[in-house]
Image (cartoon, rainbow, N blue to C red):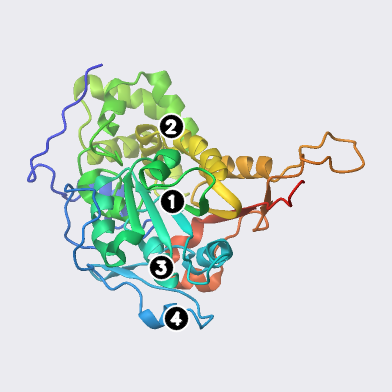
Amino acid sequence: MKRSETTTDPQARAAWPLPEPALAYFPNARSVTSDRDLVAPGHRAGGSIRLAHTPKLIDLFQADLFRADLPEPIGGAALTGNRPHIPVLLDRCVELLAPALTRRHTDGSDAVLIDATLGAGGHSEAFLTRFPGLTLIGLDRDQTALRLAGERLAPFGDRVHLVHTPYDGIDDALSQSGYRAGELDAILFDLGVSSMQLDQADRGFAYAQDAPLDMRMDQSTGLTAADVLNTYDARALTRVLREYGEEKFAPKIAGAIVRQRAVTPFTTTGELVELLYAVIPAPARRTGGHPAKRTFQALRIEVNGELDCLRGAIPAALAALRPGGRIAVEAYQSLEDRIVKGFFADATASRTPAGLPMELPGHEPEFVALTRGAERADGAELDLNPRSASVRLRALEKVVRMEGS
């Protein structure tokens, strides 16, 4: 398979405004919001993924909000430029997972938490500060994220273990950190693309800036979005757009992509946005949010294998928890939430054959739900953090069995 070339020259990869025709029909393209937290303005990709023992970049949280003796809410914001980036549903995530982390000691000593989607470390910093005995294992496939999070979490020393892996690599991450499946107290997933990835224009995740069509969360391996656009046939492109972007104009867009690349291969996000403007009918462009959103989501999911990764990660996470352990998952779009909902429904279902008058011993549900369906952000959270508008939060606890049961 012939791969399209992607330049690594810093000047060539710099962000520039979208062409005026595209901006005229995509008025929201000059600004874009994202779903997760971010720190450390001005840091570029690259560098070691090891935990760096350097001063903390940004003092995200005020210390008095984390005093163990006060039942005060936990909150915080990292700043990028002049914009606050606040971990989504931070208070609620801490509230849901805290009982599992404090079963043996109130400060979290001897407890292990996996942040399976580390990002820039906003949730992780909150847990480590609130529970000063807690050990945290942070997972991320993005080497830039690991570097920045390592700098941010360096003050917590050897309580932090960072592992370069997608979030379905939970068993390997435990092993590398000196633990085994069944010894984990809690795990948190904050799914989707991070603010850090969206806000770095040269990564190609956002339709707001013209940039190389990359979209890889791990830039050291795998197909780029340009590879997908320039090598997939029309049927495969239609499948990707329809299945992962729920795009009703998928066949029309796929056909236009194939025709365009025969003349000039796709290299930048601006070229794709201009094509979408030309293909999507005007009435559809004016409703339902940015017309490029669905196509960009579909390409990102395909490039990173996100849904297959999630299908492997949730069962591994459930198996890794010790009795009394808890899992919380934040999803931002229906495709992810559907997968989580399905696994959680199976985990909380009885295995006793239908029709029997009582629960058979050993056939009880392995987990109990901690949330009633999917929790959404309330008005106060939305006022604090508009990025939480699309979040769906689900959580479970692994059942503690009595001896002999």
Q: Which mark is residue 289?
A: 1
Amino acid found under the numbered disc labelled 4: Arg
Secondary structure category for the residue under label 3:
helix
- 192 vs 271, nearest the viewer: 192
Q: Which mark is residue 67?
A: 4
Pick out the residue farthest to the right: 357
Task: Name the residue carrying label 2.
Answer: 241
Q: Mark 4 and mark 3: span between their CA atoms?
A: 12 Å
Q: Nearer the viewer, mark 4 or mark 3?
A: 4
Task: Name the residue carrying label 3.
Answer: 126
Q: Please, is residue 100 above or below residue 1 in the view?
A: below
The residue depicted at 37 percent of the width and 23 percent of the height is 255
Secondary structure category for the residue under label 4:
loop
Q: Of the two numbered discs 1 and 4 on the same chain, state the one appearing first in sequence.
A: 4
Q: Of the two numbered discs 2 and 4 on the same chain, state the one appearing first in sequence.
A: 4
Amino acid found under the numbered disc labelled 1: Gly
Q: Nearer the viewer, mark 2 or mark 4?
A: 4
Amino acid found under the numbered disc labelled 2: Leu
Secondary structure category for the residue under label 1:
loop
Q: Nearer the viewer, mark 1 or mark 2?
A: 2
Q: Residues within 10 Å of mark 1 (few under 14, many from 20)?
A: few
Q: Mark 3 and mark 2: span between their CA atoms?
A: 37 Å
x, y (%) of residue 275? 30, 35
Q: Residues within 10 Å of mark 3 (few under 14, many from 20)?
A: many
Asked whether the viewer can see residue 182, the reply is yes
Q: Nearer the viewer, mark 1 or mark 4?
A: 4
Amino acid found under the numbered disc labelled 3: Ala
In the figure, is residue 338 to the left or right of 80?
right
Pick out the residue farthest to the top: 1
Q: Of the two numbered discs 4 and 3 on the same chain, state the one appearing first in sequence.
A: 4
Q: Nearer the viewer, mark 3 or mark 1?
A: 3
x, y (%) of residue 404? 76, 46
